Amino acid sequence: MGLFKLLHGHKARAFEGIPGPEPSFPMGNAGEFLDKTRQPWEVCCDFAHEFGGVTLVWMAGQPALILNDPKLIGEVLESNWTNFYKDAPCKALAPVITGRSLFISNYGKGWNKAHSENPFTTLNQEQFLSQQIKPLQMVIRKDLQHFIDRSASSDIDLYRDMQKLSFHAFSQAFWGQTFGDEVFEWFQSLARTGDRRMQCKIPALLNLPPWRPGFYSARSKWYRMFERLVKESRRKPDHDAPDMLNQALSHGPDLSDAVLAEALATNFFGGVFSGSSTINTALYLLAKHPEERGKLIAALDADLGGTEAYDLETLLGCRQLDFVLREAMRYYPAVPLYLRNSVPEREVKLGDHLLPPNTMIFISNYYLHKFSHHWLQAEKFDPSRWDNGVAEENPFASGYFFPYGRGPRACIGQQYGIFYTKLALATVLLNSTVDLNPAQEFKQHFFFGVMMPKGLKAKFQTRAQCPPSGRSDEIPEPA
């Protein structure tokens, strides 16, 4: 401790009065985040219990703040957001998602342009979502039938198989078609490279390009395929097609083929992992609480008529479905950790403190989602807590509930993400019985910035039910 203070004590003066654990030479408190028995957001949560809403930690000789105070988090992500920027993930993901992407570009001309031109900004989202119900139901049901068929001889690996199901659904929604296993493997290759770089412990290595030759082949095929699809659709746009590609060509701004292709391709990275994480988390928590699973299935039968012939208003209006997914996202948020830095060119005020340029900031919703002074019986999985006005008092992107982030840089696809997880979970439960042993360990795994529950196995069976009068059992399969 003495040697650490001797070397770095002058940096600590700007953070005087902020509590935190004692740093040790030479790593400071970085060892806490390298502990394989705990995830980074769990470390942030532990520090919040010990030190309160703001904690000073040292990543080697670099001071950093952990924020668990909703007011301070609001300053960084919302009210004063232009004074904070994304640093680490941008450099890590630059080979995978180029700097013009909305996901990793920073505030200013580049971000403003990407945001204003993004199809999620320019299209009528309610109309888009309404048109997605039937196509996505068909795609999900096709993958679900594969789950049922394979369950006769083996377990379904929810980690990978739900990713693939979500990948197919996203393909249909944004490109108007599903893609084969080869394309899914390209996507996985890019994601694995991005994940390795995001979790790299030696920042200097991020200045080097990825070394795996297979990555470059996958990246070339991935983006070339999407540019080709944009070119083909531009020559013969289908103005009535519900997918985002055709809608963007028909009603969106005039983007180049490469820019539009990348904007749509980025949706996979932004949603496949978080969407599959939320669905698997909900299935696991429902398996551990069969009474809640029974209540949800009864609500789906009652509110959706036990069929899939419902509209957007009916789907979004199923309160029990909404409560279950909100509670799953509160209990185990798919994105439990956000990183920001104060701007590098000047000091920035945060609360009562004046931060030095380029101060690193950790933000986790994991602690606030289970903050006992705000949530009654916070450690209990209880979808009914959202009733009686609680959902309205705690909307998405609020102080104690922000699974998709907060402020202008919150997930631009949040509305679609909520819609998709509701549609997918409803389709799974209306068409199958999921046998998931609740004694399995819920292993939180960090992948591409998303908490992915790993190791969950399940079996699927066709759900025995008597269809309501007038229901057609013959729903055509997608091409």
Image (tube, helix red, strand yellow):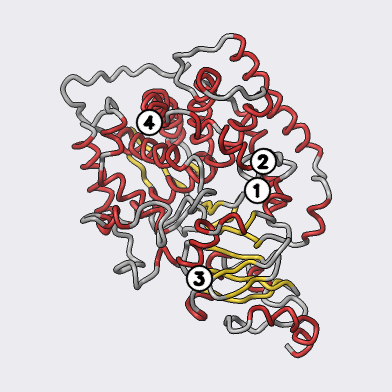
Residue drawn at (53%, 40%) of the image = 272
- Residue 454 visible? The answer is no
Lateral position of residue 359 relative to residue 459, left or right: right
Q: Residue furthest top?
A: 236
Q: Split into 4 quadrants, where in the image is the N terminus?
A: bottom right
When the figure is inspected, residue 311 is found, relative to residue 62, above or below; the finding is above
Label 3: which residue?
45
| Residue depth check, mark 2 versus mark 4: number of the one nearer the observer | 2
- Identified at 73% across, 57% down, the residue is 200
Label at residue 126: 4
Q: In the figure, residue 415 lies in which quadrant?
A: top left
Real-space CA distance between mark 2 and mark 1, rounded to the nearest whole angstrom: 7 Å
Element on which disc 2 rests: helix
In primary-sequence order, the first of circles 3 and 2 is 3
Q: Secondary structure at mark 3?
A: helix
Q: CA distance from mark 2 to mark 4?
A: 27 Å
Q: Which mark is residue 106?
A: 1
Distance from disc 1 to disc 3, alpha carbons, whole Å, reads 27 Å
Q: Nearer the viewer, mark 3 or mark 2?
A: 2
What is the distance, in whole Å, between disc 1 and disc 4 at their CAs? 28 Å
Question: What is the x, y in percent for residue 140?
Answer: 42, 30
Identify residue type, mark 1. Asn
| Residue under pointer 2 | 110
Residue type at mark 4 is Glu
Q: Is residue 2 above or below residue 155?
A: below
